[in-house]
Image (tube, rainbow, N blue to C red):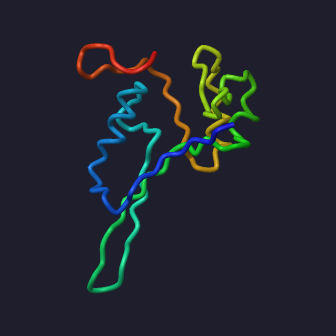
């Protein structure tokens, strides 16, 4: 089975968070929720000090702990090895959030807010 990953050159990241905003819109998340979060790390030594913006998101673990704790099977791995969520089966217990070693899971009780007034992203 193929393993997918995302390569992000953090030396070119400006910290604009546009990738986070695009992900939020695609997935219907609230402004304070995100599947992509950032950790800012200091680089270099004085006087050449900088900041590296490191995006952290779901790693689609080979043996994903979030899939094991889901009581309804709403969190599962698809045939391509991606961790997916069947929102119709999710009961909101949030056990997947506690099991995720990357703290990449979020939960939203509300209906998605479409900021532009038209539908975009997946249902």
Task: Provide residue 86's location: percent of width, then percent of height.
Answer: 61, 20
Q: Position of residue 44 (x, y in %)?
A: 36, 79
Q: Nearer the viewer, residue 2 or 89?
A: 2
Q: Nearer the viewer, residue 70 or 91?
A: 70
Residue 8 falls left or right of residue 78: left
Query: On the picture, is 97 further left or further right than 113?
Result: right
Q: Quadrant of the N terminus?
A: top right
Residue at the location (36% across, 64% down)?
52
How many numbered tags mark residues here?
A: 0
Q: Quadrant of residue 119?
A: top left
Q: Nearer the viewer, residue 61 or 74?
A: 61
Q: Is residue 72 above or below residue 44?
A: above
Left or right: residue 77 versus residue 108 is right
Position of residue 8 relative to residue 61, above or below, is below
In the image, residue 45 lies at what x, y percent? Answer: 35, 84
Which residue is pictured at 37% across the width and 74% down the height?
A: 43
Residue drawn at the location 23% of the way across and 20% of the way down: 116
Q: Is residue 7 above or below residue 81?
A: below
Task: Report the residue at 65% width, 42% height from top.
Answer: 98
Residue that sits furthest to the front in the current view: 2
Q: Quadrant of residue 65?
A: top right
In the image, farthest residue toward the bottom: 46
Question: Where, by quadrant of the figure, is residue 83 drawn?
Answer: top right
Residue 115: % across, % down: 26, 23
């Amino acid at each position: 089975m193929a393993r997918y990953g995302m390569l992000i050159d953090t030396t070119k990241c400006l910290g604009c968070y546009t990738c986070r905003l695009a992900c939020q819109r695609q997935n219907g998340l609230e402004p304070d929720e995100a599947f992509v979060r950032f950790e800012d790390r200091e680089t270099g030594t004085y006087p050449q000090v900088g900041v590296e913006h490191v995006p952290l998101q779901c790693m689609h673990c080979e043996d994903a702990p979030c899939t094991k704790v889901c009581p309804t099977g709403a969190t599962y791995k698809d045939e391509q090895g991606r961790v997916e969520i069947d929102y119709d089966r999710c009961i909101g217990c949030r056990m997947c959030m506690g099991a995720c070693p990357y703290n990449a899971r979020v939960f939203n009780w509300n209906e998605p807010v479409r900021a532009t007034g038209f539908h975009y992203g997946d249902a």
